[in-house]
Image (spheres, grey):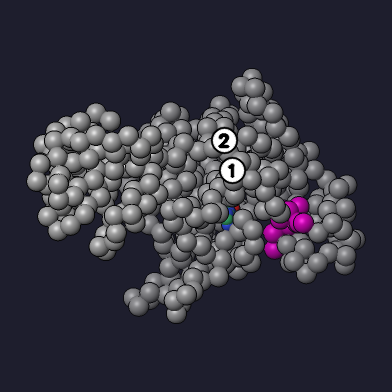
Amino acid sequence: MGKYSRPRGTHDVYAGAEKWEDDSVRWNVVESLWREICRIYGYQEIRTPIFEQTELFKRSIGDGTDIVSKEMYTFDTPGGDSITLRPEGTAGTLRGYLDSGLYARGGVTKLYYIGQNFRYERPQSGRYRQHQQLGVEALGADDPALDAEVIQLMLSFFRKIGVSRTVVKINSVGSSESRAIYLTALKEFVRPFLEEFSEEGKARFANNPLRMLDTKSPRELEILTDAPSLTDYITDDERVHLETVCGYLTAAGHTYEIDPHLVRGFDYYTKTAFEVQSPDLDAQNALGGGGRYNKLVEQLGGPPTAGIGFGIGMERVMIALQRLGAELPLPTGPTAFVVTLGDAARQAGVNLLSQLRDSGIAANIEYGGRSMKAQMRAANDSGAKYALILGDDEVASGTVQLKNLADSTQVAVGLDKVVGMLRGV
Ligand code: AMP
């Protein structure tokens, strides 16, 4: 309606939107359940800047990845620095962990975040150019129990908010050494079929061969069915690590699939990589994913520090929840809604509103000089428990009509008593 529209691939999030991925009320409920799960698992919040030095992302995510090669929002500042809007949460979190000296506390540091990410991708259902992730990073141990913990945290969160159907896929992407041997074998296998690959497939062959496995092209997938499997190239230590993680998950009653073709969009992963998908989403069906990155802290100039983390896509979670018909514990309306008729009552009503709010009672009023009927409709629409109605008679007698909006019963209450009465409601 206005002169400007929002940029392609973005969306507004506001109260009462029909699409759950646009509804700020539901976002708030899900975010508080997220914070609650993180508290239960012993994770503390980190908030990092929404932009960082471009080099941080290049160095960590990897030059050959789609994100770095074509999806970053990068610009030069007037001061001549190259800055990039954060495309994912891990790099900035680790930079913050090092910068702030958190790493010096020793032991395992467990962090969570809620943050906006920016990727210049082709927008489609569940894929935005600005999206929000809920994520964790656990730094300081290469313990398979920690891998199991973060996966369980993600699944506990999904269960808590009502994402009742999920598919867990898990793999080991080894280390850069074991992967190098595997990539040679993979390229040897693909070479005779390369002409049948798309331009993108060919580019991946040249720049980032592991990503060939992530193709959606039916022909490429068919060729790759018989490709060598990364799981056959990882070391014994890496294999045992994966088996141990799986053992913990099984013991906790989780089902999962080992998917030797699971690779994720970042170069930094080592050992465990995982993804949780939803059968209730469209093509972009990954609700969240993550993995271990045992070399990344070092790569960013820190001491050798093992780590593991994941990111969950907020918008996709909301789409899945709506499709599942989930019920979120939505907040209730205000306790009181003040309705006034006439100037004297308006003055008394505005005073009453302040007293209610000062006492911590959620209270509202309608503005714009609207009729009594319109004010009552607004009171009902707000979901308020009580309408507090004031007219000339009430002002004269120092009372207010307390109307229970659920059953329409009404009593006159002293103006000096009503705040005390509603405090306990
Ligand atoms: P990634 O950071 O690529 O590992 O993604 C983690 C999760 O973030 C994915 O599983 C998605 O749920 C979500 N996600 C990633 N990219 C987008 C996007 N462009 N739009 C919406 N959600 C996204």
Mark 1: secondary structure: helix
- Left or right: 117 in relation to 178: left
- Left or right: 127 in relation to 114: right
Mark 2: secondary structure: loop
The quarter holding residue 389 reads top left
Q: Distance between the residues labelled 2 and 1?
A: 7 Å
Is 211 colored magenta in this rendering?
yes
* Residue at horizontal 71 percent and vertical 43 percent from the top: 279
Q: What residue type is labelled 1?
A: Leu
Query: Nearest the camera: 172 or 390?
Result: 390
Query: Nearest the camera: 299 or 66?
Result: 66
Under 8 Å from ligand 1: the CB of mark 1?
no
Identify the mark at residue 243; answer none if there is no mark. Answer: none
**Number of residues whose C-alpha sits closer than 10 Å to that of mark 2, classed few (under 14), some (14–19) or many (20 or more):** some
Identify the mark at residue 321; answer none if there is no mark. Answer: 1
Badge 2 is on which residue? 162
Q: Is residue 14 above or below residue 98?
A: below
* Residue at horizontal 14 percent and vertical 40 percent from the top: 399
* Residue at horizontal 52 percent and vertical 64 percent from the top: 10
State the image coordinates of residue 228 (x, y, percent, origin top left).
Answer: 83, 45
* Residue at horizontal 10 percent and vertical 41 percent from the top: 398
Q: Which comes before the other along the chain, label 2 or label 1?
A: 2
State the image coordinates of residue 46 (x, y, percent, origin top left).
Answer: 38, 45
Q: Which amino acid does label 2 sit on?
A: Gly
Q: Can you name the residue that lies furthest to the bottom here?
A: 3
- Left or right: 358 in relation to 86: left
Q: Can you name the residue that lies furthest to the top here?
A: 251
The quarter holding residue 409 reads top left
Query: Which residue range is magenta in the image?
Result: 206-216
